[in-house]
Amino acid sequence: AQRVTQPEKLLSVFKGAPVELKCNYSYSGSPELFWYVQYSRQRLQLLLRHISRESIKGFTADLNKGETSFHLKKPFAQEEDSAMYYCARGVYAGGTSYGKLTFGQGTILTVHP
Amino acid sequence: NAGVTQTPKFQVLKTGQSMTLQCAQDMNHEYMSWYRQDPGMGLRLIHYSVGAGITDQGEVPNGYNVSRSTTEDFPLRLLSAAPSQTSVYFCASSYRPPYGYTFGSGTRLTVV
């Protein structure tokens, strides 16, 4: 099975502290990896995708194929970063992506003032 | 450009009733999916489509049907609602998978 693991259900930090949300994935092929954010009772929003190597709202994520990880990092957390964060990967069958995503269980990030 | 539109936003059903959750997108995306979100379980794929006329099952398809007669619409039908189908349902669409999905605002369904 192609799995995504987010080991922390809850993560609390203080404003200005660094934050790292962990994500590990199974399967050794070429993954499509994403981070989605969901603010309270809102729709999921795409935060980052590994193909873009971009920085959105100060967040970055580096794909480590050796460790099969795609951890999300931000050097200085803000209160408005408090949300649910989901790591997701594209699902492959026979080497082809069919546009399906497997999600981790999510990490609730709380940034305290 | 409305993105992905889901209706209704809230729904309460009695056990055994049927209903259709609507999903429409105006971005000419070929890929569309339905997910359910349950506490502690993340999002799980119900059904997906890679284009008009093409659908397939995801991880948790039992009790749900889909069809894709047009590129724009991807309705999800609950055949005979059960309390286990109480969940938040999200529809999503994508131009191409590596670029990520755009999600709708969700339908909160309660089956009593």
Image (spheres, coloured by chain):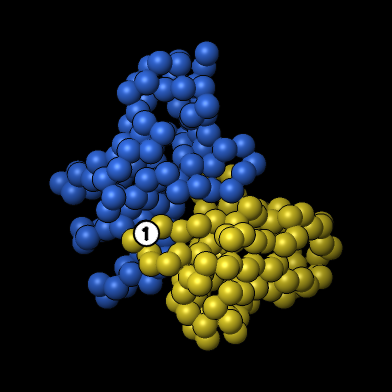
Subunit that carries the residue with mark 1: B
Q: Residue at x 35, y 28 (%)?
A: A74
Q: Is residue B84 visible?
A: no
According to the colouring, which chain is blue? A
Counting the numbered discs, the total is 1
Q: Is residue B79 left or right of residue B44?
A: right
Residue furthest left as drawn: A66
Residue A33 visible (yes or no) = yes
The N terminus of chain B: image quadrant: bottom right
Q: Which chain is yellow?
A: B
Q: Residue at x 27, y 58 (%)?
A: A31
Three-letter residue code for mark 1: Tyr
Q: Quadrant of residue B60?
A: bottom right
Q: Is residue A6 above or below residue B26?
A: above
User: Where is the C terminus of chain B found, in terms of image quarters?
Assistant: bottom right
Residue displayed at 45% across by 15% down: A14
Q: Residues within 10 Å of mark 1 (few under 14, many from 20)?
A: some
Q: Position of residue A62 (x, y in %)?
A: 24, 41
Q: Position of residue B13 (x, y in %)?
A: 82, 62
**As drawn, B101 above or below A5:** below
Residue B66 position, x and y percent, is: 61, 77
Please name the residue that numbered disc 1 is placed on. B99
Vertical relation: A98 (above or below) B108: below
